[in-house]
Amino acid sequence: MITEKKNKKMIKKKNRFLSIVFRFKKNKLALFGLIIFAIMVFMAIFADFIVDYEIDAIKQNMQNRFNPPSKEHFFGTDNFGRDVFARIVFGARISLFVGIITVGISLFFGVLIGATAGYFGGKVDNFWMRIMDVFLAIPQMLMAIAVVAALGTDMFNLLIALSVSQIPRFARIVRSSILTVKGQDYIEAARACGTSNSRIISKHILPNAIGPIIVQATLNVAITILVISALSFVGLGVQPPTPEWGSMMADSKSQLRYHPYLVIIPGIFVGLTVMSLNVIGDGLRDALDPRLKN
Amino acid sequence: MLRYIGRRILMMIPVLLGVSFIIFTIMEFTPGDPAMLMLGENATASEVNELREEMGLNENFLVRYYKYIKDAVKGDFGISYRNKVSVSKEITSRLNNTLKLTTLGVLISVVIGVPVGIISAVKQYSIIDYTSLITALILTSLPAFFVGLMLILLFSLHLNWLPPTGADSWKNFVMPAITLAAASMATLIRMTRSTMLEVIRQDYIRTARAKGATENRVIYKHALRNALLPVVTLIGLNFGTQLGGAIVTETVFTMPGLGSLMIAAVRTKDTPIVMAAVITIAVIAGFINLFVDILYTFIDPRLKSDLVKN
């Protein structure tokens, strides 16, 4: 009897998931984005098998500067004679790592703060949301620059700098989803059964708010990748010689006239990655909530 | 209405205090002694100590923050650690370029973004619609500095039409403004399109058509006005984003503005400049948000009674 019930529940859950997958699959643009993103992830994970980090991406080879794209060097070589393709491949690892970890950290704190504020309401809500307002008043780029300036430009500080400025957005989304669900009867019922607050939030409220959170998370990975490349471009992000797409463009800025491909290639890779995440995010939004689609 | 505006301005004060406190705290962690920076490497320990005493650096962190705010309210943001110029003077001289740049950027994005969004919605699933959506997608996905570099490559290096750097004539502002406008233009196209599509399906639009109103009148009188609210919100938000984006854009075009000043100040650990620049940007962003909220009441008179009541 109990197993039967469980099975039914499983099927129902599975169906919901399948219908989301089905709707997502119908969206050609989103599928295209997923393929591109998969390629980037593949590059990031298997970078070591594709090229040699030390020899191709880091070691300078002054005899081989500014080779145009060829068979040995798919994307040519840069002003230090390093293989641009190798640097692009490892750049994917850095961009995706920073993007995903940053969103992970800010998602964690954002959900924590947003859920607390939305669920308890009143003074708690006011307190946390005013703090979030203060953080929102500082443009993300500016906040990141200030944190990096104070703490120095290593990877860990960069992750903090980028995460801090994204927490308010997640907190707001989670809070507003919770506010819409909070008044509904089933929450009241759960509370009447004596369910604890943390259980109500994690088991009854958050699953219903997960859609917009996932969509925002996807889009924020895209935004983070843009910000990290911009930070590296102005010299406050990932430091040379580490291959990062933004700093690769900064390195080659002075070569723009005679070797524009050195700037264009990393730019296209940033653009493709961000675009793939944007279309995946849009596709997810439509698949999760078909009513929104027009 | 006036009371509402007054209250909103009062509400900005805690936000500004919070912003300045956060930045003050962050800069406190910055390694390097300001007195040492001002005196140079060869200063003796007693000289450094004397200057620290004079600048009040030996005092408690909170005391210094309090003093800073007290002076800042009077418009005195201290002097730069690097070249000992008054910070407020430095900021106002640079602010002009940044404001010009962002205003121009917002203007370009509105003048192009809103009409393209409307046309896209009216001619949904046409070639124009797809082209504008794909262009918007590409523009939101490219880093702004990359767009800037590509503009330099085309218009300065190849065609030789526009100067790549500086801020001397209007020509200097064309490419930075387009660079800055690109991403917000894209978000505006998408937002205008989707709200217009939503509005066009409403009953009152059908009624307007049924009454025999011309298509132009239906779109521009009945639909646009109702679709305007979220669009105006986005324009206001874009202003804030563009102030942040100006930091990078100014670096690309080596334009003497607030952003490039700040990057240089961050690199040289010139705390007073960084503080003042951040506060200035937060104040401007706050006032723009207030302005947008007031604008709402003109677009949607129903909101006015709400505001005044509360």
Image (cartoon, rainbow, N blue to C red):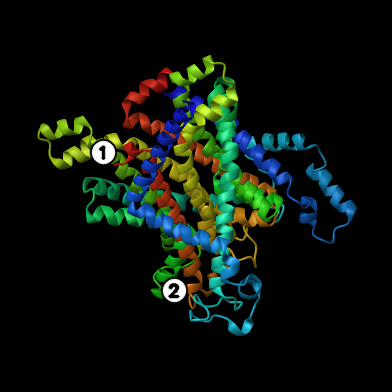
Density class for disc 1 (Cα within 10 Å; few <14, some 14-19, many ≥20) is some
Asked which secondary structure carries label 1, the reply is helix
Q: Looking at the picture, tell me which residue is in the foreground, B263 or A164.
A: A164
Mark drawn on residue B157: 2
Q: Element under label 2?
A: helix
Check disc 2: other Cα within 10 Å, few if <14, some if 14-19, many if 20+.
Answer: some
Q: State which chain disc 1 sits on.
A: B
Q: Residue at x 24, y 48 (%)?
A: B119
Q: Is residue B13 visible?
A: no
Query: Relative to residue A231, is residue A181 drawn left or right?
Result: left
Q: Please state the horizontal and vertical placement of residue A136, each as a whole percent of the image.
A: 54, 39
| Residue bearing the label numbered 1 | B224
Position of residue B83 measured from the top left corner of the image (x, y, whole percent):
70, 56
Task: Give residue A58's quadrant in the image.
Answer: bottom right
Nearer to us of marks 2 and 1 is 1
Q: Is residue B120 visible?
A: yes
Quick check: do tags 2 and 1 share a chain?
yes
The residue located at (44%, 38%) in the rendering is A211
Q: In the displayed structure, would residue A233 be above or below residue A85?
A: above
Q: Residue at x 77, y 55 (%)?
A: B37
In this view, the residue in front, B309 or A184, is A184
In the rendered image of this protein, does residue A252 appear above or below residue A206?
A: below
> Looking at the figure, which quarter contains the C terminus of chain A?
top left
Closer-to-camera residue (A128/B221): A128
